[in-house]
Image (cartoon, grey):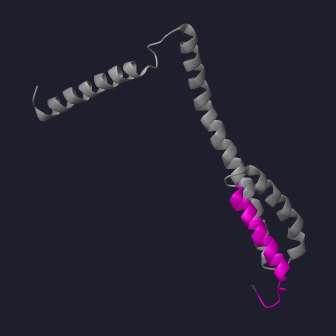
Amino acid sequence: MSASEPVPSSREFTFVGIAYGLHVTGLFLFWPALIGIVLDYIKRGDVEGTVLESHYRWLIRTFWWSLLWGIVVLGAMLTVIIPEAAQVAGLARSGHSDAATPASSRRRLAGWLAGLSRIQRRSDGTT
């Protein structure tokens, strides 16, 4: 903050604090972040030329980057989850009761562990 910048009123500091609070709450619930972004755009013009202008600019930029990356991550998750869910549903409809039961999972795990044990014995020189 340089000497030529006007000092914002305490009310403006309160608004930026509320905006930060809304954005932090928006990490857990989406609607407070929407209220926060609207507040950011409305109040940004009121603090033009002050130190608070950079805070609003940062909040706006962070919101849009977070939204973008949230959509990318959600899309990546859904491209993995939806095909797997469709496969499980298809197995359930076809009557493959052994496909995802705990007993079959234990058998697969036991086979995998036995294979690892054989590999370990070979690497130790014991057969």
- Residue 34 on the magenta span: no
In the picture, which quadrant includes the C terminus?
top left
Spot occupied by residue 87 in the image (x, y as percentages of width and height): 56, 19
Q: In this picture, is 74 found above or below 111?
A: below
Residue at 46% x, 20% y is: 100
Spot occupied by residue 26 in the image (x, y as percentages of width and height): 72, 55
Q: In this picture, is 111 found above or below 40?
A: above
Spot occupied by residue 73 in the image (x, y as percentages of width and height): 63, 43
Q: Main secondary structure of the magenta part?
A: helix
Quadrant location of residue 85? top right
Quadrant location of residue 72? top right
Residues drawn in magenta? 2-26
Residue at 82% x, 82% y is: 10
- The furthest residue to the front: 102
Residue at 71% x, 48% y is: 68
- The furthest residue to the left: 126
In the picture, which quadrant includes the N terminus?
bottom right
- Residue 6 on the magenta span: yes
Question: Left or right: 68 with respect to 83?
Answer: right
Residue at 44% x, 19% y is: 101
Question: Left or right: 89 with respect to 14?
Answer: left
- The furthest residue to the top: 94
Spot occupied by residue 103 in the image (x, y as percentages of width and height): 37, 19
Q: In this picture, is 21 found above or below 116?
A: below
Quadrant location of residue 5? bottom right
